[in-house]
Amino acid sequence: MSRRAPWLVLLLPIATALFIGCRKTPPPTATAGLPVVPVSLPVQRPVIEYVEYTGRADAVTTVGVKARATGNIVRAPFIEGAEIKANDLLFEIDPKPYEAQLAQAEAQVRVAEAQHVLAQASYNRVKNLTGTVAVSPQEVDQAKAAADAADAQVKAAKATADVYRLNLSYTKVKSPIDGQVGRQYYAVGNLVSQDQTLLTTVVTTDPMYAYFDMDERTLLQIRKAINSGKIQQAKSAGDDLPVLMGLEGEDGFPHRGKVNFVNNVVNPSTGTIAVRGLFDNPKPENGRRLLSPGMFVRIRLPIGQARSAILVVDRAIGSDQGLKYVYVIDAEKKVRYRRVTTGPLEDDGLRVIEEGLKPDETVAVGAIQQLRPGMDVEPEVHPMPTPGAPTAPATPPVPAGPKKK
């Protein structure tokens, strides 16, 4: 085995050091060690102030259909829950007793008419003998009175027949309005009483009402806005205050209507006043109407004209003992604590900032919990995120480069 030359052993570390020194190293970056924070410029656009409530749908007209005649139900030809027209037959009560009463009354009319014919003929004969010794003036008056009484008997008999004819018509219970009929409370064969037994109900379907309770503070705010000209007061029925509605499971408030009634009394127990909106409830071809009386609805009521506002994503806003704030990244890339006054939340997830923020200031939209005032960061600009768009990461800040030793 040969021995290595001593000089080779001495040169090996020097060659290794020279080889390593020839490798290129990346220059140090100016932002090395600073955490990256996603930031966005606020959105500036017109917004409309609004308030939201919950309420219930109700029919414009609700009719309880009661029996107008006493008797047994012999027919109920309608389909429960179906849409019907006015004068559609719903129930038929046994008409035989009423037919007999009407026949008797009509016979009495014929008797009275016959008596009237006889009395009138007697009067005419006596009247022709007036001025002769054959009849006295008293007999003429008596004949005339008998003819007049017979005529009155005819009219009374006809009126009685009309009453029985009307009673007979009440045995056919018809719908008083167009709408949707409810359940059948009494089946065929049941005995019902005149003006007492509720047979079914009929409600109108289009348009529909939506009732909700407005708080006194908002009521005063709207009235002051009207008095100051910020809200145009309705001049006619077609200029009523617009109102938006959303149903269970729907996004936003896709249904548009108008406020057509505000109650005249504020409830002192709740500090609210009843308000009513009117909404169309059309029936699609081969479909069903959406609204039914009693249905839960969400109401959005605009309370002013459109105005320019600054908005940021709702998650960029922090809360400190009830006070709202955002983190602003200044020109020196330092985090600044900025207290703000917030407004309503828009449909796209952006929150209105009433005070405390300028349109040209960048706002941290991610890693909010890891930021502290005065902290140095490396801002990474993103468009203002919305729920429907890709969002900036909300993970802890990631270093932009290797840490300096």
Image (cartoon, rainbow, N blue to C red):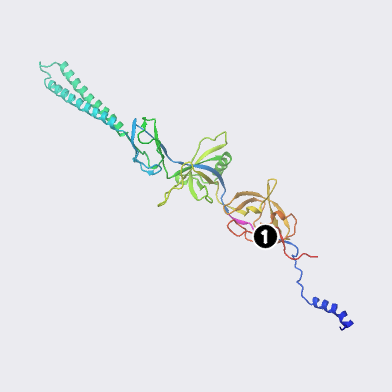
Q: Is 3 situated above or below 145?
A: below
Quadrant of res 157: top left
In the image, 73: left or right of 133?
Answer: right
Placement of the C terminus among the 4 image quadrants: bottom right
* Residue type at the position of mark 1: Pro
* Image location of residue 391, percent across then percent down: 62, 58
Residue 44 in magenta? yes
Q: Residues within 10 Å of mark 1 (few under 14, many from 20)?
A: many
Specify whether residue 58 is in view: yes
By secondary structure, the bulk of the magenta-drawn segment is best described as strand
Q: Nearer the viewer, residue 98 or 162?
A: 98
Which residue, given by chain and number where applicable, does mark 1 sit on? 38
* Image location of residue 123, percent across then percent down: 15, 22
Q: Nearer the viewer, residue 379 or 57?
A: 57
Farthest residue toward the right? 6
Q: Nearer the viewer, residue 218 or 351?
A: 351
Specify whether residue 69 is in view: no
Residue at point 57%, 39% (across, down): 216
In the image, 14: left or right of 234?
Answer: right
* Image location of residue 352, percent across then percent down: 61, 51
Farthest residue toward the left? 133
Secondary element at image label 1: strand
Q: How many marks?
A: 1
Quadrant of res 360: bottom right
Residue at point 34%, 32% (across, down): 72
* Image location of residue 299, percent across then percent down: 53, 45
The residue segment tinted magenta is 41-45
Q: Nearer the viewer, residue 100 or 224?
A: 100
Placement of the N terminus among the 4 image quadrants: bottom right
In the image, 43: left or right of 249?
Answer: right
Residue at point 28%, 32% (across, down): 96
Residue 364 in magenta? no
